[in-house]
Amino acid sequence: MPEPLVLLHGFAGTGHGWDAVTGRLERYTARAPDLRGHGAAAGAQPVTFEAVTADVLAAAPPRFALAGYSMGGRIALHVVLAAPERVSRLVLVATTAGIEDDAERAARRAADDALAARIEAQGLEAFAAAWLAQPLFAGDPPAVQALARADIARNTPAGLAAALRGIGTGAMAPLWDRLGTLRMPTDVLVGEDDPKFRALGERLARVLPAARLRTVPGAGHALPRAAPGALAALLDDAP
């Protein structure tokens, strides 16, 4: 019988960002909620790590596998640290456990605040153009970029601004020193062509006690959109 799997999307996406993956899964029955500040939950307040964590745990079954991409991976770490006994397996996709250096984190928070203000002032279309032009996504094929634009369009400027200010990387206290307590089987998935998050993934795999690092060949950061078949196969291949 298929096992329950909760999938958490990245910033400026929605649960629909997992659609191409969920349709390929064999081992799991998946649910992919919209996180606060995004999609159907764009207006939910407050947008904080505590509130989003509570939302995920309230909607999930008593025991479940948990996967998160990018921002969703950071949320997944908060969820599993809050209720480790409920998570049977953890999958972290192109993500981080936070910025440890105080000055670097403050600079990122200022940058997130500035981006939030631009989104509020300029709207989603201008944001999408700038967001998808950054090196993290610029190499994605046109079809993958089109999927990203469609998902961004499901959001609101106010919701994305609130997410940046409340659950952005700059707003997050680093979790690296707490990861050694997590004993469930963990997969850390990274794209071969995503050097920043490949390095972060290598560190996550070293720190997490029961983790293995797995690399998707020829893929960048946006694994749920760019490599859904490979990602589904890795999700089905549980330890």
Image: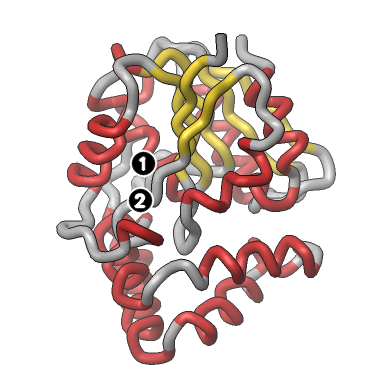
Q: Secondary structure at mark 1?
A: helix
Comes first in the chain, label 2 or label 1: 2
Residue 105 appearing in the image: no
Q: Are marks 2 and 1 in contact (CB under 8 Å)?
A: yes
Which x, y percent locates residue 57? 27, 30
Q: Is residue 221 left or right of residue 41?
A: right
Q: Quadrant of the C terminus?
A: top right
Looking at the image, residue 71 lies above or below residue 92: below
Between residue 182 and residue 155, name the one nearer to us: 155
Local SS, label 2: loop
Taking the spot 56% from the left edge, 77% from the top edge, the residue there is 128
The residue identified by callout 1 is 75
User: What crowding class fits label 1: few (fewer than 14 Cα within 10 Å), some (14-19), or many (20 or more)?
Assistant: many
Rendered image quadrant of residue 43 = bottom left
Mark linked to residue 3: none
Query: How is the model colour-coded?
Result: secondary structure
Left or right of residue 87: residue 5: right
The residue that label 2 is drawn on is 35
| The N terminus: image quadrant | top right
Q: Position of residue 22 (x, y in %)?
A: 62, 36
Q: Quadrant of residue 11?
A: bottom left
Residue 61 percent location from the top left of the image: 33, 21
Q: Which residue shows up at 25% across the image and 59% down it?
A: 166
Vertical order, 16 against 142 (above or below): above
Residue type, mark 1 in image: Ile
Can residue 203 be seen in this snapshot?
A: yes
